[in-house]
Image: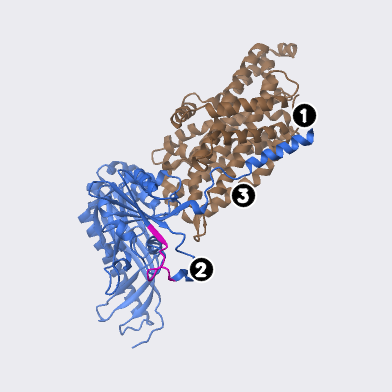
Amino acid sequence: MRRAIMIGVIFMAFVLLTGCWDRRETNDLAIITGVALDKNKEGQIELTAEIHSPGGSGNGSGGGEDNNQGGVQSTVLQIGKGSSIPEAIENLNEKLPREILWSHAEAIVISKAFAENGISDELDFFVRHPEPRLRSYVFISDGKAKEIMALRPSLERSVSEALIKLAESEVLMKATLFDLMEMLKGEQGAIVLPMIDKLSPEEGQLPSESIAYIHRSAVLKQGKMIGVINDQISRGVLWFRNEINESIVTVEPDEADEIISMNLIKGRTDLVPEIDGQSLKMTVKIVTIDDVIQNQTSWDLKRLDKLKALENELVQKIEKCLTDTLDTVQKEMKIDIIGFGEEFRRHHPKKWKKIKGDWDEKFPTVQVDFDIDARVLRAGKGSET
Amino acid sequence: MIEKGKISALQMGLLMYHAILATGILFIPATVFNVAKQDIWISPILASPLGFLSVYIAYKLNKYYPKDTIMQYSKHILGTFWGKMLGLLLLLLLITSLSVMFWQYGEYVVSEFLPHTPKSVIIGMMVILCAFAVHGGLEVLGRLAGMVFPVFFLLFLVIIILVLPDVEVKRMLPVMENGLMPSLKGAWVLCTWFAQFGIIYFFLPFLTDREKGLKFGMLSVLVVTLTLVVTNIIVIWLFGNVTENFNAPFMSASRYISLAEFLSHLESIVMAIWIAGTFIKLCVFYYVVVIGTAEWLNLSDYRSLVLPMGFLIGVFAMQVFLNSAEAAEHFRIVSHEIMDTLVYGLLIPIFLLIVAYIRKTIFKHKVRRTN
């Protein structure tokens, strides 16, 4: 009897051992690698999903060449339409034979037209859903977002992969979904996002073979896109936000006609806000270390006085870049994308409460001082002509 | 005494650690953030005295009646009728509390990890598992806690270390932007958790090294406070003002980890930590409910009550809230208005202690007669 019960119990355990209730097999999934959001003329949302195609990659030895001459594509595109993102996804689901998996959607491209109408409400989906990741990169596309997704990059397997790599290279602006949320929640709701553009195809190339690249940055206020800043200004904004990691600075000293190029090794920015009665002051402290990578001038950089002169040139160059940025951001656009408000809040919480209300008027009046310490550590070998 | 087993004071401390922290580690940062903003890490420090107080009062009561749990000495202190009434109140509070905990467990697992699995399966399996452990008795629970704690703590540390590359300390600034009030309000919310330390009164009589009971109880409160402070600091360093977007910020933090592109999606580690801890927590309260009921009914053994009680709690846990709005309403009430844990963890013991003190010191002879 006892044995019979034991056997019964063991067999009952088998019922539970069949596996998880919520199992999902990889070959039943449509793995989304990138998403593009557009708004069409009727005001509907068009969600273009870039879906990893299992047949396209890793198919034996020929895998690497697939993307080139009309081989099997490693990704497929599918469009869903609807008045909201969930509806568009449902529409997409109707067209897809497989279940959608969001957790690998690491590039989100939003079209300019979409962004001009406001993105904060729509982003709610990506935040609330347990699958999409906070580390997904967000971009604004100059034209239609789905056209970007339709490109076939030659180096990477898919556009989203290429975009992710571009963002990670940190040459220009990058923003993850988390950064975007943080900027939205910030004191001002001022946001900068990288914009992507596509190169016009070169002769003999198919239109889809051109590449997408990060070019300029989009400025959004309260979730609505209000303007665009160019690459130089974007770099200035990166300086202010202490996010600069990659930069090549070229100076042209007055005494020498030719140019010297330097590569940024390290750049660090500290914003020191001061409130003195009614006037607001911000001191921008920058420490930067650069290496010389090209010297076309006749300067012998092994000499201390020339190196000092070069450092001076570097300081002036950076200061110029920053004042240009301020002219655009602070005086023209009047939008605090360089994080001044946050710094005032963090350093002077009591006084900040008084000026918080009319920060929009106050921001252009903030006086900015620079304190730049630039050092050139290595002059490189190079030829001394 | 019904319980034949004995646990060490250290094991008791570990049991209490899990009983408080298992759910807290996930939900506390978000709940406290709603009121305390970037000062959430101050709130546990401000709320911890309540935990120390609960432990101290339970210890004092235990000094008066070293061999009894609260069910028995409430009779000695208040007389049979009122003692039983108080015991009934206590049991009702504990049973509701336990059912809500089971519901919370089921709800979280379903909403975050297994959306298509029926909740009855998830709650039911946990009830059965806990029933096994509780049936094993107090010694088994003590050993379990001792076994789970190192794993819990190690994985907790792993997560903290892996999150570090992404933190930014300035998200914590300005400290006390709006004075002390927000963090005090946060501390008030935390009282619900710290008051639960009161249930230590069910374990103190079963200690092998009784004189260390107070020490390890206090130590447990201290470690819980520290863990909460560390969790809250990490969450605020990582997420800043975005914290309010997450139900369980610590879980989202583990999701956010991405090292060298391949070490990512570590939420399963947190889930493992959390399930192990929650299992201990549920066992502790389950045990308390079972042994409390057995003592209340003057039974000679509590083991026969384990399964019926589990059934009752399981059914209650599945039916307790119909939707998340109802649950939210409940949690708002218990954490702001009628704080049930404060009643059973602190108010009832304080009341008993005052009455006992009066009887022992002012009417000395009377006590001797009733005893």
Looking at the rendered structure, the secondary structure element under dot 2 is helix
Chain to which the residue tagged by mark 3 belongs = B
Of the two numbered discs 1 and 3 on the same chain, state the one appearing first in sequence. 1
Chain to which the residue tagged by mark 1 belongs = B
- Give the distance between the C-alpha atoms of the residues marked 1 and 3, in whole angstroms: 33 Å
- Give the distance between the C-alpha atoms of the residues marked 1 and 2, in whole angstroms: 66 Å
Rendered colour, chain A: blue
Q: Amino acid at mark 1?
A: Lys
> Which residue carries the number 1 mark?
B4
> Is A70 colored magenta in this rendering?
yes
Q: Tell me the quarter of the image containing the N terminus of chain A.
A: top right
Chain to which the residue tagged by mark 2 belongs = A
Return the x and y of residue B204 as percentages of the image width and height. Answer: 69, 30
Q: Amino acid at mark 3?
A: Leu
> Which residue carries the number 2 mark?
A60
Q: Are marks 1 and 3 in contact (CB under 8 Å)?
A: no
Chain that is brown in the image: B
Return the x and y of residue B52 as percentages of the image width and height. Answer: 59, 33
Magenta residue span? A65-76
Q: Is residue A46 visible?
A: yes
Vertical relation: B327 (above or below) B86: below
